[in-house]
Amino acid sequence: MRDTGKNTKTLFDLDPSSIICLYNINLKGKGAYLFHAGENGYKQKIVFNGQEYDFMPILAQGFELHGDGKLPRPKLTFSNHQGQISLRLDRFNDFINYKVTRIKTFVKYLDNINFPNQINPHAEPDADAAFPDEVFFINQKTKEDDNIVEFELVSLLELQNSMVPARSVYSNICPWVYRGSIGCGYKGKPIADSKNKRFMPSGYFPQTNSEGQLMDTSMVGAEVYLSGEYKSTEFAPYTADGAYVTWQAGQSYNRGDVVQIVPFDMDSETNPVGIYVCMNNGTESNPTNDGYNWVRDECARTVCGCRLRFSDSATGAGGGERLSSNPDSKDSFWTESEEGLPFGGFPGVDPYEFK
């Protein structure tokens, strides 16, 4: 880890109580850029909490808080040698609205691997011995030329086009992205289309009269795509890790087959994997542009659409499987009677008029 350059310090040259600043640019599901600016003269890779932060020749300024109550608007200035940063700008839309986290800790709490013989001579490495994270967002690119690229950072409250509060209040419309990891989290079998027309004649049913007829067919229609010849158990995932097989060009699919389409810009929060059910035998077309032979599993974004997937009866029909809110636990089954519904709307506001 030592640098032989005359103007480059080693970690032993730094006081154990020197502050190290680390930066994380979250790439929205496509990884992250982890780096430090060498602000103490140390220009080698730093490992903290098991993550590697490369040295990058940048100027980080304006992070200080002032007594006038104004929020800071820091600036990050990157060297654009041979257009390396410009190439990244094209791929990531100038990094606009990307999250930047500034992590501050002391030299003495860095991981053992940073030091000779992989032993920290100052103290026991401690990932929790850090200042509170400083979170900003890239608001705009303020300069780009052959030499540098400069960005302005702002807090979430000052972010351009941000909405406070972040969620609109609707009584019977859910804002969550279906099968997204935030809010919804559903990962069970395909249930219905965007109009609540079910794939199988099983699972949640609304109330019926004494003759067994649906009392409110506007909520869940009596029709299903795949009637008596199919059972919900046939929708079990085909792969060992619980995912459906990915659609393959040139392969023939039959009625009742289920495939997944992974978007090019897949994001577990905002653009998750799409699940499609085949309607006709001998289908070879791409599910994303063939609404006759394929039907996508979608949610109507209503309370009824939520119940189709998370009611107690839906759990027995292959629904209810949901991503756990605890990242350390396994996926769990969600039932309405025990957990309620993960519905993102606000049904309680329905009686009130907007004024």
Image (cartoon, grey):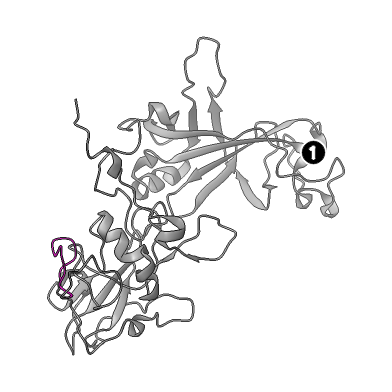
Residue that appears at 45% across and 46% down: 84
Residue occupying the far right of the picture: 121
Q: Which x, y percent locates residue 198?
A: 22, 72
Residue that appears at 79% across and 33% down: 14
Q: Which x, y percent locates residue 336?
A: 40, 60
Within the magenta stretch, is there residue 113?
Answer: no
* Three-letter amino acid code of the residue under disc 1: Lys
Within the magenta stretch, is there residue 219?
Answer: yes
Residue that appears at 30% across and 73% down: 203
Q: Which region is colored magenta? A: 212-221
Q: Nearer the viewer, residue 155 or 199?
A: 199
Q: In the figure, 230 relative to 91: above or below? A: below
Q: Is residue 237 visible?
A: yes
> In the rendered image, which quarter is residue 140 located in?
top left
Which residue is disc 1 drawn over? Answer: 108
Horizontally, residue 350 falls left or right of residue 124, namely left
Give the quadrant of the C terminus. Answer: top left
Q: Assign the magenta stretch its main secondary structure.
A: loop
> In the rendered image, which quarter is residue 13 located in?
top right
Q: Which x, y percent locates residue 8?
A: 72, 37
Q: Nearer the viewer, residue 291 or 56?
A: 291
Residue that appears at 49% across and 21% down: 72
Question: Which secondary structure lies at badge 1?
Answer: helix
Q: Which x, y percent locates residue 329?
A: 58, 62
